[in-house]
Image (tube, grey):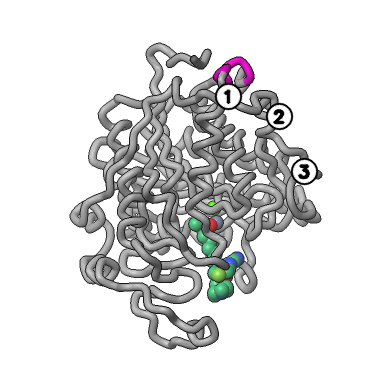
Amino acid sequence: ESGITKPKGYNVSFHCNPEMEKHHFGMTHPMKPWRLTLSKSLIYSYGMSFAMDNYISRAATYEELATFHSTDYLDFLGTVLPEPVPRDLENQNPDLKFNLGGSDCPLFDGLYDYCSMSAGGALDAARKLVSHQSDIAIAWGGGLHHAHKAEASGFCYINDIVVAILELLRYHPRVLYIDIDVHHGDGVEEAFFSTDRVMTVSFHKYDPNNFFPGTGALDDNGPKSEQNPGSHHALNVPLNDGITDEQYAMLFDTIIGQIVEKFRPTAIALQCGADSLAGDRLGRFNLQVQGHGACVAFCKRMNLPLLLFGGGGYTPRNVARAWAYETALAVGVDDKINDYIPSHTPWRDQFRHDTLFPTLEQILGEPRVNRNTQKRLQEMIQHVTEQLRFVQA
Ligand code: V1S
Ligand code: CA
Ligand code: ZN
């Protein structure tokens, strides 16, 4: 039906779980699991399922989650029930156990299932890479980078990224973790603070007082100690409001290019949080779908096993466009996508290539004033270069 066929000798696997997408964080909460359904519909409408191996992922087991999380925390997560907390009282609750139940990490129906399904997709994706069945594995339902060993944080309860990277580390000597969500990837950074087998790099909006989670300064490179093999293996690129595609690509290509050369990863895990797009409900950047996708294209060119995670993204229409475009890049059909739209697709003409690329005017919300100076961007490159002097693959 579709003109898309699987490229020979090159495999992309797509991991999703429709059950996960049905969960609700609550009416006013910005995290909308149905954005995954929207993304998948767009991806399938373009006929891309014909070019990938498609899997309905399973839920991760307790034992798999316990490779990172504490059993105390998992036991609590598995038993807590949503209790109706009056909105005005919840923020005053002084002792939320494991930070569960506040407005950022509410208790909702099926919470444990939701978390284990997100991690299950990420783990399935990691396993496809280590078994060489896939070259690129996609888990848009993962990417929940703020969760700690025994604490929920910033809409994240289970750190599927850490669990998946631990799986990669069973076979790969060195994994490069890159995070383009507008928020700092603090949970993943902290989990690998003491190892030189994972290098973490997060690009994010940084304002210690006014932007979540407030960490990730330029000189925040992990516990500094001679004995810690992980020192210099946590890199941060703190940005200001309004960064553009051109500036972001310059930083990304220069920094990631240097890291790949020095650290010599054997696999790459890329968190593709779509809240770094212009018009995001929580984000502050001016990235377009093309600029966001350029990071995926750059990683693909490194020719290493590549795991793509989702993450944030709070303007669902734009999230779907970005992740559909990035799926097309992974598969390698981005430039000829119009040729593949199945002939039976209703509203076929509305699904042309340009649907994926809203102009800045079409994006909801005003573009932001760009507060990133060239001088500051050069300082960041300089700092990263200095950190990399200590890194030996
Ligand atoms: N920014 C922001 C933001 N908005 C909310 C929020 C809004 C409405 C709700 F009903 C519930 C929550 N929380 C925040 C941030 C957390 C951002 C998490 C981003 C996650 C990710 O994209 O990186 C990965 C999936 N929380 C805060 O700023 C904390 C507060 C300090 C202020 C907001 N209130 C609601 C909680 C405490
Ligand atoms: Ca980030
Ligand atoms: Zn985010």
- Does 307 sit left or right of 214 as displayed? left
Q: Secondary structure at mark 1?
A: loop
- Image coordinates for residue 181, horizontal then vertical, percent: 55, 51
Measure the alpha-carbon separation of dots 1 and 2.
16 Å
Dot 3 lies on which element? loop
Label 3 neighbour load within 10 Å: few <14, some 14-19, many 20+: few
Residue type (three-letter) at the residue carrying disc 1: Thr
Tell me the residue at 58%/41% (across/down): 320
Q: Are marks 1 and 2 in contact (CB under 8 Å)?
A: no
State the residue lying farthest toward the left.
63
Name the residue beneath numbered marker 1: 345
Q: Quadrant of ligand 1?
A: bottom right
* Residue 118 in the image: above or below residue 73: above
Disc number for residue 362: 3
Q: Which residues are magenta?
A: 338-343
Of callouts 1 and 3, which one flags the residue occurring earlier in the amino acid sequence? Answer: 1
The CA span between labels 3 and 2 is: 12 Å
Queried on whether the Cβ of the residue with tag 2 lies below 8 angstroms from ligand 3, the answer reads no
Query: Image quadrant of residue 164?
Result: top left
**Residue indicated by mark 2:** 354
- Whole-angstrom CA distance, mark 1 to mark 3, is 24 Å
> Which image quarter: residue 256?
top right
The answer to whether any part of residue 370 appears in the image is: no
Q: Is residue 374 visible?
A: yes
